[in-house]
């Protein structure tokens, strides 16, 4: 997949994950793209472990979305532990 498509799919996945996790107001477009790309790597590592192997741009989007949701859940878990 080319870098431009990876950034585009990562941005969409990060944005959708931030909406699902209700953190959209806290982060901007750059952080959405970063979360989506890291989520893509995380999802690409986790999903084959459970037997799922998705291909195509829709498969990459679903993989990145699942990975980004997992990443945001981990970040939210650590944020709750901090004093406010």
Image (cartoon, rainbow, N blue to C red):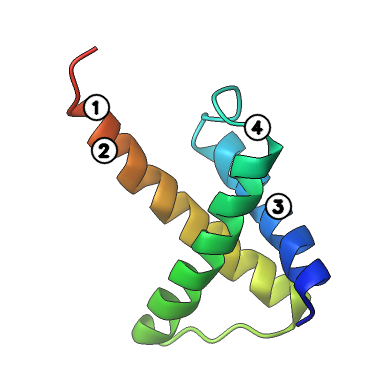
Q: Nearer the viewer, mark 4 or mark 2?
A: 4
Question: Which residue is label 1 attached to?
Answer: 80
Name the residue nearer the viewer: 72 or 49: 72
Labels 3 and 2: the sequence-earlier one: 3
Distance from disc 4 to disc 2, alpha carbons, whole Å, reads: 20 Å
Looking at the picture, how far across and down is residue 41, in whole percent? 50, 71
Please report contact status of discs 2 and 1: CB closer than 8 Å, yes or no: yes
Q: Is residue 81 left or right of residue 61?
A: left
Around disc 2, counting alpha carbons within 10 Å, would you say few (fewer than 14), some (14 to 19), or many (20 or more)? few
Question: Which residue is label 3 attached to?
Answer: 11
Around disc 4, counting alpha carbons within 10 Å, would you say few (fewer than 14), some (14 to 19), or many (20 or more)? few
Please report contact status of discs 3 and 4: CB closer than 8 Å, yes or no: no
Around disc 3, counting alpha carbons within 10 Å, would you say few (fewer than 14), some (14 to 19), or many (20 or more)? many
Question: Which residue is label 4 attached to?
Answer: 28
**Residue drawn at x 81%, y 70% as measured from the top left:** 5
User: Which structural element holds mark 4?
Assistant: loop
Distance from disc 3 to disc 1, alpha carbons, whole Å, reads: 25 Å
Distance from disc 3 to disc 2, alpha carbons, whole Å, reads: 22 Å
**Residue drawn at x 39%, y 75% as measured from the top left:** 46
| Quarter-of-image position of residue 65 | bottom right
Question: Which residue is label 2 attached to?
Answer: 77
């Amino acid at each position: 997949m080319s870098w431009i498509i990876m950034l585009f799919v990562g941005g969409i996945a990060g944005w959708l994950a931030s909406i699902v996790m209700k953190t959209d107001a806290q982060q901007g477009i750059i952080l959405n793209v970063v979360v989506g790309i890291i989520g893509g790597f995380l999802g690409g590592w986790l999903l084959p472990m459970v037997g799922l192997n998705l291909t195509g741009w829709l498969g990459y989007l679903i993989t990145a979305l699942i990975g980004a949701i997992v990443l945001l859940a981990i970040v939210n878990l650590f944020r709750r532990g901090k004093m406010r």
